[in-house]
Image (cartoon, grey):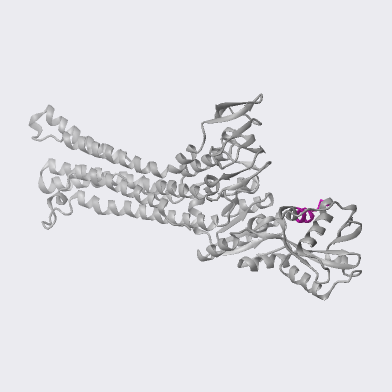
């Protein structure tokens, strides 16, 4: 980029030097022109560096989140050490208001942790014993002791910093346009400058004014703005993403996300929470039980079960503060449910099919079971002897932001397809609830990447969203893989964009950031090209014959050319900085 500046200032300098040595060669020296050109360029570079530094603010903020010290417990005594000396399995003490130094598992205490640096969400997250904590997050009101599980470069914060650095340092495909132009631009400008000098010397016969025009062309055409157009926008776009819990692993992902036409989403753990939760607990009218009494009996029976649905019912009852009884003579009936004694009475709890033949199931209960199953819920029935006492339904509930995320994707003119291994009935129930455009049900894990490939064969750019190991091949196959940051390491490794908050609303936000970044790059390239297209002819003297223009434009001095060149670079960087203030909500 500096070749043209070096040529222009050198021509003025060495011409002046020859006048100084050989006074008869001319009358006026232009040392001040060379000096002011270089001074203005340096001033422009300084302003540009300060402005460009703001585009790298995301990394500075992330690095600033790392505490310098940690308080560990050594031989029962608290000791403050440098964070670089923290070892795996060290027990670390965190007081209210302190920043957590490394990743770990809480061994004592409870608190609310501000994880906004990781997720972009301002609401603190409650943490208790055995919960994970992340380095860089802020402890709320409780005293915590936790065991270090990841230190140094292995912490989540260090990995985020590395990802952002790599994305900001990589080249987007659109940069190739600027590179191709720059490859021919400098030689072309040198030729234009020589032609300008030759034409004006031939017209006027005056060496000095012709030389001044040549120098002005060389200086004003410096392609700095062109070179800055893409990288500054990429830095600002990836920084904006990092502030919102969206990590672009490569700048190519940042560019290509803008072109997506279809988003394919895994269901379990992506659209839904990924774990069963009690949704309904409804006693039969003839049972004489309250809803809580039905839940207590059902959860007490399941205390001895290892089945995920049973565990979910027990956990739900305990969260409600209900006191459960210990079952006696517990039996697990494979494929049907459980049977046990509670307070001397025998109860059964299991699938509706188990009770169809030998229990007195009221028509109202049968109708209720059918309605709940049509909603995609798993229904369990409680009975004493042959009397049905009520039903409990369990479902993998939607994530709170799933509906909103899909609505926003539709607003961005994207088609949304749900991919799941679940049966068609359950899949359609979830699909209707979140309003996806299409459903692919009963898809085996090894078939998911094939489904993505099928969409790509229709010349559609596909984004895949997933969180599990079974999603990794599909994430890798997709044009852009969006990995849920709360998912498995394999899925995160395979993805191109990581949603560290785990929120699906990060997908439309990522696409908005991508589209606005690409729009900014195009604006920057337009500014850079237009600047050169307009000002190179001005510097070459095309306005000289027209007296309606002011003298400084008709004979553009190299100093003004240097000032204009610096201003063009700053304008491009400033335009990129606007990305930080763009609305992606």
Horizontal side of residue 584 vs 307, given as left or right: left
Q: Which one is nearer the viewer's eye here, 223 or 165? A: 165
Q: Which one is nearer the viewer's eye here, 200 or 90? A: 90
Q: Residue at x 33, y 44 (%)?
A: 224
Q: Is residue 337 magenta?
A: no
Horizontal side of residue 556 vs 4, given as left or right: left
State the quadrant of the N terminus. Answer: top left
Kindly indicate the quadrant of the structure image that contains residue 400. Answer: bottom right
Q: Position of residue 65 (x, y in %)?
A: 50, 38
Horizontal side of residue 208 vs 484, given as left or right: left
Is residue 459 at least partly visible in the picture? no
Is residue 228 at least partly visible in the picture? yes
Magenta span of residues: 305-314
Q: Residue at x 45, y 39 (%)?
A: 60
Q: Position of residue 236 (x, y in %)?
A: 43, 48
User: Considering only vertical position in the picture, is 339 above or below 572?
Assistant: below
Q: Position of residue 431 (x, y in %)?
A: 65, 66
User: Considering only vertical position in the picture, is 18 above or below 266?
Assistant: above
* Furthest-bottom residue in this view: 363
Total count of labels:
0
**Predominant secondary structure, magenta span:** helix
Q: Which one is nearer the viewer's eye here, 268 or 448? A: 268
Q: Position of residue 417 (x, y in %)?
A: 62, 63
User: Considering only vertical position in the picture, is 425 above or below 79?
Assistant: below
* Furthest-top residue in this view: 75
């Amino acid at each position: 980029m500096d070749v043209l500046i070096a040529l222009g200032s050198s021509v003025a300098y060495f011409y002046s030097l020859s006048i100084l040595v050989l006074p008869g060669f001319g009358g006026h020296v232009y040392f001040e022109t060379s000096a002011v050109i270089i001074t203005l360029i340096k001033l422009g570079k300084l302003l540009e560096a300060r402005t460009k530094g703001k585009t790298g603010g995301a990394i500075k903020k992330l690095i600033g989140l790392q505490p310098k010290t940690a308080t560990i417990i050594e031989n029962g005594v608290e000791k403050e050490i440098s964070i670089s000396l923290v070892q795996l399995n060290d027990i670390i003490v965190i007081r209210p208001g302190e920043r957590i130094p490394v990743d770990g598992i809480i061994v004592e205490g409870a608190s609310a942790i501000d994880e906004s640096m990781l997720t972009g969400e301002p609401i603190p997250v409650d943490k208790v014993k055995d919960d994970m904590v992340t380095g860089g997050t802020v402890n709320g009101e409780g005293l915590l002791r936790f065991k270090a599980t990841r230190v140094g470069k292995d912490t989540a914060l260090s990995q985020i910093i590395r990802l952002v650095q790599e994305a900001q340092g990589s080249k987007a495909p659109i940069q190739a346009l600027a590179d191709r132009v720059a490859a021919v631009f400098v030689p072309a400008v040198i030729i234009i400058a020589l032609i300008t000098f030759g034409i004006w010397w031939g017209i006027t016969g005056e060496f000095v004014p012709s030389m001044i025009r040549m120098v002005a062309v060389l200086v004003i055409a410096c392609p700095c703005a062109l070179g800055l157009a893409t990288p500054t926008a990429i830095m600002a776009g990836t920084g904006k993403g990092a502030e919102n819990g969206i990590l672009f692993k490569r700048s190519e992902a940042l560019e290509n996300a803008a072109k997506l036409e279809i988003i394919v989403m895994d269901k379990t753990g992506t659209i839904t929470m990924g774990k069963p939760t009690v949704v309904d607990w409804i006693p039969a009218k003839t049972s004489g039980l309250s809803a809580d009494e039905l839940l207590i009996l059902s959860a007490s029976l399941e205390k001895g079960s290892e089945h995920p649905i049973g565990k979910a019912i027990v956990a739900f009852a305990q969260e409600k503060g209900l006191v459960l009884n210990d079952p006696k003579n517990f039996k697990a009936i494979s494929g049907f449910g459980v049977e046990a004694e509670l307070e001397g009475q025998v109860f059964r709890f299991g699938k509706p099919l188990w009770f169809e033949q030998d229990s007195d199931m009221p028509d109202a209960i049968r109708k209720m079971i059918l309605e709940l199953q049509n909603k995609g819920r798993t229904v369990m029935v409680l009975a004493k002897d042959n009397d049905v006492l009520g039903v409990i339904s369990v479902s993998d509930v939607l994530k709170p932001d799933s509906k909103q995320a899909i609505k926003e994707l539709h607003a961005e003119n994207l088609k949304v397809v749900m991919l799941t291994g679940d049966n068609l009935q359950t899949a359609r129930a979830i699909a209707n609830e979140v309003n996806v455009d299409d459903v692919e049900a009963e898809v085996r894990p090894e078939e998911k990447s094939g489904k993505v490939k099928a969409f790509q064969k229709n010349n559609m750019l596909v984004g895949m969203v997933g969180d599990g190991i079974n999603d990794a091949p599909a994430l890798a196959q997709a044009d852009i893989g969006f990995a849920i940051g709360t998912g498995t390491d394999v899925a995160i490794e395979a993805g191109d964009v990581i949603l560290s908050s785990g929120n699906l609303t990060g997908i439309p936000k990522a696409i908005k950031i991508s589209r606005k970044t690409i729009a900014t790059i195009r604006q920057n390239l337009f500014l850079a090209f237009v600047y050169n297209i307009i000002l190179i002819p001005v510097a070459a003297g095309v306005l000289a014959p027209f007296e309606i223009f002011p003298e400084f434009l008709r004979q553009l001095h190299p100093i003004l050319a240097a000032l204009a060149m610096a201003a063009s670079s700053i304008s491009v960087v400033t335009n990129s900085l606007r990305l930080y203030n763009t609305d992606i909500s």
